[in-house]
Amino acid sequence: MAGPVAPEEQKFCLQEVLDTFKLCLSENKDVYLEHYIAGWRGLVKFLNSLGSVFGFISMDAVNKLKILVAYLEGENGSQYVTIQSMLKYELDNGLVDLTKKASNPESGCRTLLRLHRALRWLELFLERLRTSSEDSKTSVMCAEAYNESLAQHHPWVIRKAAGMAFCVLPGRLAFLEVMNVGPPEKVVAMLGEAIPLISEVYQITEELYAQHNLLELP
Ligand SMILES: CCCCCCCC/C=C\CCCCCCCC(=O)N[C@@H](COP(=O)(O)O)[C@H](O)/C=C/CCCCCCCCCCCCC
């Protein structure tokens, strides 16, 4: 008899990601770090299912998630419950390198900022996917979303490697199938539910970082 399936081997399911992003926001619109991390873990599971070409991207995302988990589960974990409390705690205690990397090269604030920028890419990509026609290319949608967002923060070598990886993305239909939701119309409907949630989490985080002048952390 087969034993239980390890979490990292479980199939990606868009519904799960939707559920975690729903849990991200508190009543007064604070963003829970635990659910933010869980949302990204679900997305990384999807990325891993696309093959080893995406390994360098997945590895970077996983490393950043590990940094955040270490803070959340560390001795000052209660300060990391929400993105708002993390910012306040790290800024009040001089734990963020604001202009150049120095004694805090892996602060929670700068680590989360990298994922936050990637969330914008996700929002743009999923919106393209949702409104795409049957013959649209995922590689083109992905590259356009990347160029409008993350690429502006990446050096040439990363942009080049990312561009090459996009070329081996599966076609639109196969891509929608991997989401394990059902027929394309159902995936499109679920994307219509997921995108506003992702967008709201993105906007709240963006405004918070902008208020504190943290959008260009080294
Ligand atoms: C609803 C499901 C459908 C879509 C599923 C998409 C799944 C995507 C999962 C993960 C996305 C990866 C997130 C990548 C975070 C990158 C953070 C970053 O910018 N890191 C760079 C800067 O870090 P520091 O050096 O300052 O610490 C780092 O240099 C980056 C290295 C790796 C390259 C990142 C390329 C990102 C391309 C965008 C993702 C493409 C995924 C395509 C799959 C559809």
Image: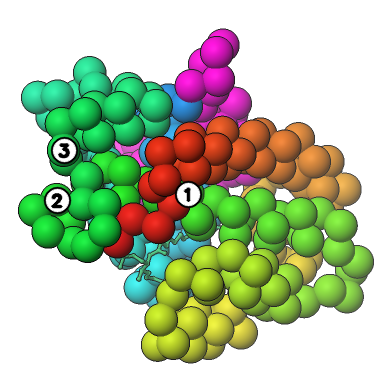
Q: Residue at x 55, y 38 (%)?
A: 207
Q: Amino acid at mark 1?
A: His
Q: Quadrant of residue 217?
A: bottom left
Q: Residue at x 26, y 58 (%)?
A: 99
Per the image, the residue denoted by label 2 is 104
Closer to the chain start, of discs 1 and 2, is: 2
Tell me where the magenta segment starts and ends, as one range.
Answer: 1-30
Is label 2 within 8 A of ligand 1 (CB to nearest ligand atom)? Answer: no
Density class for disc 1 (Cα within 10 Å; few <14, some 14-19, many ≥20) is many
**Mark whose residue sits in front, 1 or 3:** 3
Q: Residue at x 52, y 66 (%)?
A: 150
Image quarter where the N terminus lies is: top left
Determine if the magenta segment contains residue 132.
no
Q: Amino acid at mark 2?
A: Asn
Per the image, the residue denoted by label 1 is 116
Q: Quadrant of residue 146?
A: bottom right
Marks 1/2: CA distance? 19 Å
Closer to the chain start, of discs 1 and 3, is: 3
Label of residue 94 in the image: 3
Marks 3/2: CA distance? 9 Å
Residue 165: percent from the left, percent from the top?
A: 52, 81
- The reply, left or right, for residue 162 in relation to residue 90 is right
Q: Amino acid at mark 3?
A: Gly
Q: Is residue 213 above or below residue 197?
A: below
